[in-house]
Image: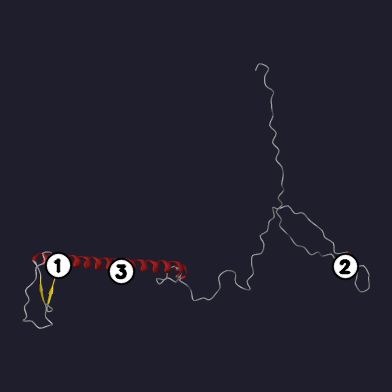
Amino acid sequence: MNNVLHLQNHCGTQPKVNRDFSPQEKIVVLTQKEHDDLKWHASYWKVQHSRAVKRELELKHELQQAKAEIINLKQRLFGKKSEKNARKDGGPNQRTSSTRNKGQQPGSTGHGRTPRPNLAVIEEIRDVASEEKYCSVCGCARSEFFKTEDSEIIEVQVSAYIRKIRRKQYKPCQCE
């Protein structure tokens, strides 16, 4: 029985052996129930395989969508900003070929401090140190010059205080 491959059924019947075949060819003898079971298993595994292939394609598509979304989010977060790009249609974002810096240009005069004429002025006179009133070489007293060196500082003065609240009290009536 070395030429015959037998799948025993549950009944335990033995197949007939045909000696006319070469050693490479093997005869398989099956009952109708074994044949039906094998066909059923084959179709079952074909369906399982097609489901697995379909599921794999869906997962590949889902992975591709997730990667595309990640690329899009990274581009939006780390990519070039649209406000800085020049518009192709020549709209208001059109950049000029000027290499001039933004803001106040070097060498130009500014507008200076904003005058505040409505603020009260408290004048403070400071004298120089007593050593500077005399000449360091001969020791003679220096005469006062008609000109002063002026500077202005705007200060905000905030004062703290305690707010004391007194509520009046009345005596109860005698009738109560």
Q: Looking at the figure, which quarter contains the C terminus?
A: top right
Between circles 1 and 3, the one closer to the viewer is: 1
- N-terminal label among 1 and 3: 1
Q: In this view, does 92 lie above or below 170?
A: below
Q: Nearer the viewer, residue 78 or 97?
A: 78
Q: In which quarter of the image is residue 24?
A: bottom left
Q: How crowded is mark 3: few (under 14 residues within 10 Å), some or many (20 or more)?
A: few
**Disc count in the image?**
3
Q: Quadrant of residue 142?
A: bottom right
- Residue 170: percent from left, percent from top: 69, 25
Q: How crowded is mark 2: few (under 14 residues within 10 Å), some or many (20 or more)?
A: few
Decide if residue 78 is on the left or right side of residue 173. Answer: left
- Residue 135: percent from left, percent from top: 90, 71
Q: What is the secondary structure assignment of the residue under circle 2?
A: helix
Residue type highlighted by circle 3: Lys
Which residue shows up at 18% across the image and 65% down it?
A: 44
Q: Name the residue under label 2.
A: 132
- N-terminal label among 1 and 2: 1
Q: Mark 3 points at which residue?
A: 60
Decide if residue 70 is on the left or right side of residue 58. Answer: right
- Residue 32: percent from left, percent from top: 8, 66
Q: Residues within 10 Å of mark 1 (few under 14, many from 20)?
A: few
